[in-house]
Amino acid sequence: MKKLLCITICLLMILSAFVVPVSASEQSTIKDAVLHFDTNTVTKIWGPFQKIYCHIWEYGKDPFYHWGNKEQLCTDTDGDGIYTYNLTEHNITLKENTQYACIFYSNSGNEHYPLLFDATVLGDTAYCTNEYYEGMSDSGRYEYFAYWRNQDPKKHGPCLEINSIGLVYGTCIPQGISTIDMFEGALINVLDNARVYSGNSDQKIIDYLAYKLSLSSEQVQQAIVNSGEKVEWEQELSTADKLVGDADLDGEVSILDATEIQLHLASLVEFTDEQVKLADIDFFKGVNILDVTSIQLKLAGYFNY
Ligand SMILES: [Ca+2]
Ligand SMILES: [Ca+2]
C-alpha cells in the first residue's frame, strides 16, 4: 500500500511537471483579442458620455453587430479612460490578411471617422486628434479622425476617401482599390462639384488630388486620358512631382517654410511663381495664413495636412 501511494505521488509529480508548463504556455498564446480606445483624447470634443461601443466590420461587408447592439459594449474596469473591446468575448474572429474597419462611439451620439486595421493591430489603442471631417451626411456632425498608437497611418489608419466635392480625407488606402483608380473615379464623378465648391482651376483641383493621393504627374496624365474627361491641366505646370509645402525651396518641408510664408504675407519676402505654387499647401484660396497653419499641423504629426 505504501509502495502504491509512493508510485501515485511520483506519478502525480511527473504529471504535474508536464501539466504546469503546458497550461502556462497555453495561457500566454491564447490571449483574448482586444482593441482599446483612449477616450482621454476625446473628452473635450465629445463632451460627457456614459458608455463606449465598438462597431466593427470587414471592409466592404456587413458589420458583426448592428449599431447600438450591446455586444459592442467596451469596458474600462480601472477607470483610466482607456476602454477595451474584447472581440473574443463577443465571438469575433479576425481572418489573416483581411482589412477591417472600426468605429468607437459613445451613447451620447459621438463617433470617430472609420479606422482601418487588420488582425496584426489587435492589442493596439485608437486615439483621436483634433482633426475632423466635416460629415457630409445629413447629421452635419464633425467626425474626428482616429489613429492607432503604434501603426503607420498609411498601413492602418483612417480610411482614405475622396468626398462628393473632391476633398480627400484619411490616410489608409482601402483594400481592393488603388489611388489611381480613386483619382480616375474622382475625375469622372466629382470634378464638376469640386469646380463649383472650390472655385479653383482644374489645374489646382487636379494637383491637389495628386498631392493627397501621392500620384506622379505621369500617373495623373495617364488617368486623365483613361477617364476620357476634358480637363484644363498641364503636366509641366503641375506640382505633382514637386515637394508641396517647400516654400523656401530648400528641399524639405520644415518650420522655415511656415516662417517664409509669414514673411511673404507681411510683404517682406517676394515669392517666385514656383514658390507661390508650393506655398499653397492646402490648394485653397492662394497663399494665406491657413497655409502656415497647415504646415505647422503637418509638422506636429497631424496626418491629414
Ligand atoms: Ca523648405
Ligand atoms: Ca491656401
Image (spheres, helix red, strand yellow):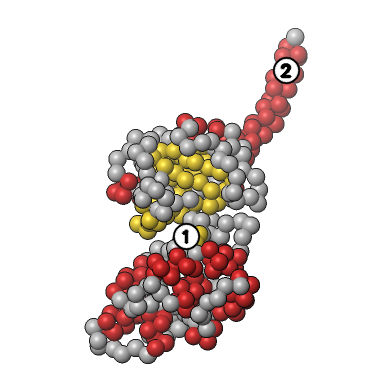
Residue 192: give its label: none
Question: Can you say whether 13 is above or below 55 in the image?
Answer: above
Left or right, 100 with respect to 195, comes to right
Q: Earlier in the sequence, mark 2 or mark 1?
A: 2
Question: Relative to residue 165, is residue 120 depicted above or below?
Answer: above
**Amino acid type assigned to the residue bearing label 1 in the image:** Asn
Q: Tell me what residue is drawn at x 36 percent, y 50 percent.
A: 140
Residue 1 sits in quarter: top right
Q: CA distance from mark 2 to mark 1?
A: 73 Å
Badge 2 density bin: few <14, some 14–19, many ≥20, Cα 10 Å: few
Q: Residue at x 60, y 45 (%)?
A: 61
Q: Secondary structure at mark 2?
A: helix
The secondary element bearing badge 1 is classed as: loop
Q: Quadrant of residue 23?
A: top right
Residue positioned most to the top? 1
| Residue at horizontal 50 percent and vertical 48 percent from the top | 124
Which residue is tagged 1? 163
Q: Nearer the viewer, residue 215 or 151?
A: 215
Q: Amino acid at mark 2?
A: Thr
Nearer the observer: mark 2 or 1; the answer is 1
Residue 172 vs residue 196, the one in the foreground: 196
Question: Does residue 123 appear to the left or right of 94 in the view shown?
Answer: left
Give the residue pinned by disc 2: 8
Along the line of sight, the residue nearer the viewer: 120 or 117:
117
Residue 286 drawn above or below residue 71: below
Compared across the picture, whether 289 is left or right of 300 comes to left
Q: Locate the C terminus by quadrant.
A: bottom left
